[in-house]
Amino acid sequence: MEAHSTLQEDANPKTGVEHSIVAGARVAGRGGVQEAFSPASAVAIGAFSLLDETQTPQAAAAAAAAFGEWAATSFSVRRRILDRVRTVLVEEAESMAVLISREQGKPVAEAHLAEILPALDHLKHLASHAEEILTPQETEPAVFLIGHKQARIEFKPIGPVLIITPWNYPFSIPLTGIAAALMAGNSVVLKPAPATTLIGLAIGDLFARAGLPPGVLNVVACDDTVAASLVKDPRFRKILFTGSVPTGRRIMASAAGQGTPVTLELGGKDPAVVCADADLERAASGIVWAAFLNAGQTCASVERVYVEEAVADVFITKVIEKTKAIRMGDPLDAGTDMGPLTLERQRAIVEGHVEDARARGARIETGGQRPEGPGHFYPPTVLTNVDHTMAVMRDETFGPVLPIMRVKTVDEGIRLANDSAYGLTASGWTSSEATAEKLERELQAGVVTINDHVYTFSEPTSPWGGIKASGIGRTHGSLGLREMTQPKYVARDMSRGGEVWWYPYGPEFKNMMAGALRSFHHPFILARLFALSKLSLSKRYLARGRKLRVIPDLFKLF
């Protein structure tokens, strides 16, 4: 690992105090002023005021007031807003990337790669395909007696949506969630993480400049204790949360009191299984990038590797060489590969995992010790001789640590990969189609990739989310967009007369229902047809039934 360059944070200090965006206006918070600090230099880069507990409800009220009119807009109106956001973002991509780098800590190039480009791709995809995805679906009744009715499923806006987002991807995660909510016809309140509030407010500015009506998107700066009241606000009809498992569980419990549905994208302890027939150069390069991207602060980072014994020595040597070549330093320097961790408390967790592993017999191949100087830097670290007694193999590290464990077989690797409370993503590395199919089938995760990792977050058609403790529901893709709606079943019958099941009942109806059960569900086809003939010739059916529909609807009996 190479140390790289001198910090440049003092060159352009940000002045002034930013305020929350509520109903299209800047609202000065009464909860005090908080400075935003660079995680690379500890230099203040700006400040923002905090809303207090009496002010945050104003954002929910603004979203509720704006919802009806926005829900009534056409897809073409919503599409134009997203297209304008994309235009503004393309023009200001560099300045936005610099802001992300300064407040969150990832290198500017990585801000373009992992934050801005995915946001642009999702904006384009949603603008182009949301109407198609949310078009009402005609559905054919499956029951013989109601086969004459028309029916469809509509996807209606759900209402004001509360979006709570983390500090590790403070631009792409909130922006893609906001875009999906808006295209589905919802209004939004965004609560960004305290550590990256300036970026959240900048997102609000983007949509305001694109012409989004006041109140449709509100951005609130407040501390987490005040934010807890937002979760309990009954005006929100959906909560989208991305963050840690403990916080996600608290949000789910609070939301349950109001019956508010939640989508939770939580943590991961994502495994990679490296098979003996893998392209080891590709596997080492891909896993090193997936482990140390964003200084390992990615819920889908590779956090543990299981490599077959036959190729373990070669693979580990390649990983160590590639890890040592990573240039850690000033995220504003174009030559930097990896910046600091965003929070000091996160660095402490990383250090704790490494020290626990060392104490239990792990070997530190490179890294493993914080550097001197300002900022929350921690070097990319590779561990070997690890096992599942160590926290680094069980608990989410969320930092630049890559533990590698040798296994005898692919089956052992899959078993250990699945031996986790988490299940966000997993990857397998192999040159065999048969082994790839086995890995795809048996790895337990919301996303499984072969010979790559992490990248599917950036693919707009790919649903994103996990199983087990890694979350509930999906974002992105058609599944994620539809989670921003409430399905509505609509049925129509324009025929005259009554239905055969309407009052009065009587003995004839009782006999008719007994025959209907045999018609629809008798295990033998001939018995079904015989019962159907009796049913269709009954007086009640002849009087009320749709006699001409009998033949076309016969397929529903089989």
Image (cartoon, rainbow, N blue to C red):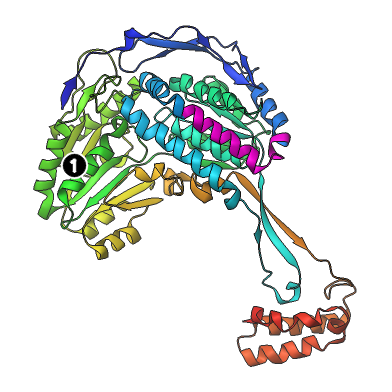
Q: Tell me, yes or no, whether the highlighted magenta stretch contains residue 75.
A: yes
Q: Tell me, yes or no, whether the highlighted magenta stretch contains residue 200.
A: no
- Identify which residue is drawn at 72% across, 89% down: 531
Question: Which quarter of the picture shows residue 341?
Answer: top left
Question: With 527 as the anchor, is 540 left or right in this view?
Answer: right
Residue 350 point in image, percent of width and height: 28, 29
Question: With 252 as the anchor, is 384 left or right in this view?
Answer: left
Vertical order, 547 against 63 (above or below): below
Quarter of the picture holding the C terminus = bottom right
- Identify which residue is drawn at 64% across, 85% down: 522
User: Residues in magenta?
Assistant: 69-89
Residue 107 point in image, percent of width and height: 31, 25
Residue 246 point in image, percent of width and height: 45, 35
Question: Which quarter of the picture shows residue 415?
Answer: bottom left
Work out whether residue 84 can be spotted: yes
Quarter of the picture holding the N terminus = top left
